[in-house]
Image: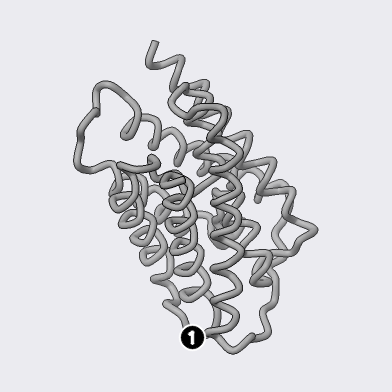
């Protein structure tokens, strides 16, 4: 239960930061820095308890790598999605239920952007948080958080920069993403996670 609560808390604050920095008078161009930093500190806070996934794609990649038990996958994903949805509702309340216009991304560029940076995120996670060569390092949270920051700066204007199905659900609750486009993130993020796990296992063998 401690692991699932940790996943809930970490994902909650990740999505809370996204909503507060993107909607209304938020952080503007610096939003990706705040988002990456939020992920970083939550990973450092909870990584020793749950692994600090806060992302169903990361959970999938770590499971395929062999470092997440099968019976944890469902509860992890459930806790992550619940945390994101609750955070979205809190953001809407704090922001006074503002009118939000969903972005209308081009499908193919968005699929490519989400796939590439979900791959990058999962690849970094597997290498800094599960590899023998980096065991016990003190930089894993920074590396993972800054990967998300990099992706958000790089392709946020193309796909919205989710790289995380739970974030995509939360962003849809906020109205930032259209529910009809949710499949883009589920497909691209899932494929990115699978590809990262396969590449990691190939290079680590």
Q: Residue at x 60, y 54 (%)?
A: 81
167 lies above or below 77: below
Q: Residue furthest front?
A: 1
**Colour scheme of the picture:** one colour
Report how many numbered discs are placed on residues in the image.
1
Query: Where does the image place residue 49, in percent across and percent down from the top left?
Result: 34, 43
155 lies above or below 124: below
Q: Is residue 186 visible?
A: yes
Q: Residue at x 19, y 41 (%)?
A: 138
Query: Where does the image place residue 75, in percent across and percent down from the top left?
Result: 57, 42
Q: Residue furthest right?
A: 180
Left or right side of 83 for 39:
left
> Of residues 66 and 108, which is closer to you in this image?
66
Q: Residues within 10 Å of mark 1 (few under 14, many from 20)?
A: few
> Of residues 70 and 29, which is closer to you in this image?
70
Q: Residue at x 60, y 74 (%)?
A: 89
Give the structural element (helix, strand or loop) at label 1.
loop
> Of residues 115 and 47, which is closer to you in this image?
47
Q: Which residue is mark 1?
A: 25
Query: Where does the image place residue 155, in percent across and percent down from the top left?
Result: 53, 55
> Of residues 16 and 73, which is closer to you in this image?
73
Q: Residue at x 56, y 49 (%)?
A: 164
Left or right side of 35 for 169:
right
Query: Where does the image place residue 112, in percent across and percent down from the top left?
Result: 62, 43
Of the 4 image quadrants, the one containing the C terminus is top left
């Amino acid at each position: 239960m401690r692991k699932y609560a940790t996943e809930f808390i970490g994902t909650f604050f990740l999505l809370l930061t996204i909503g507060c920095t993107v909607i209304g008078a938020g952080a503007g161009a610096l939003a990706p820095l705040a988002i990456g930093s939020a992920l970083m500190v939550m990973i450092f806070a909870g990584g020793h308890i749950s692994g600090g996934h806060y992302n169903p794609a990361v959970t999938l990649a770590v499971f395929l790598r062999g470092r997440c038990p099968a019976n944890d996958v469902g509860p992890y994903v459930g806790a992550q999605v619940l945390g994101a949805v609750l955070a979205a509702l809190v953001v809407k309340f704090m922001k006074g239920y503002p009118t939000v216009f969903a972005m209308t991304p081009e499908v193919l560029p968005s699929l490519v952007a989400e796939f590439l940076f979900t791959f990058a995120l999962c690849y970094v996670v597997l290498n800094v948080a599960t590899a023998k060569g980096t065991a016990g390092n003190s930089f894993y949270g920074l590396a993972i958080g800054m990967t998300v920051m990099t992706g958000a700066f790089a392709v946020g204007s193309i796909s919205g920069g989710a790289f995380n199905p739970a974030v995509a659900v939360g962003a849809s609750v906020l109205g930032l993403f259209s529910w009809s486009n949710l499949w883009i993130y589920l497909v691209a993020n899932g494929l990115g996670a699978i590809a990262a796990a396969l590449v990691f296992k190939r290079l680590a063998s």
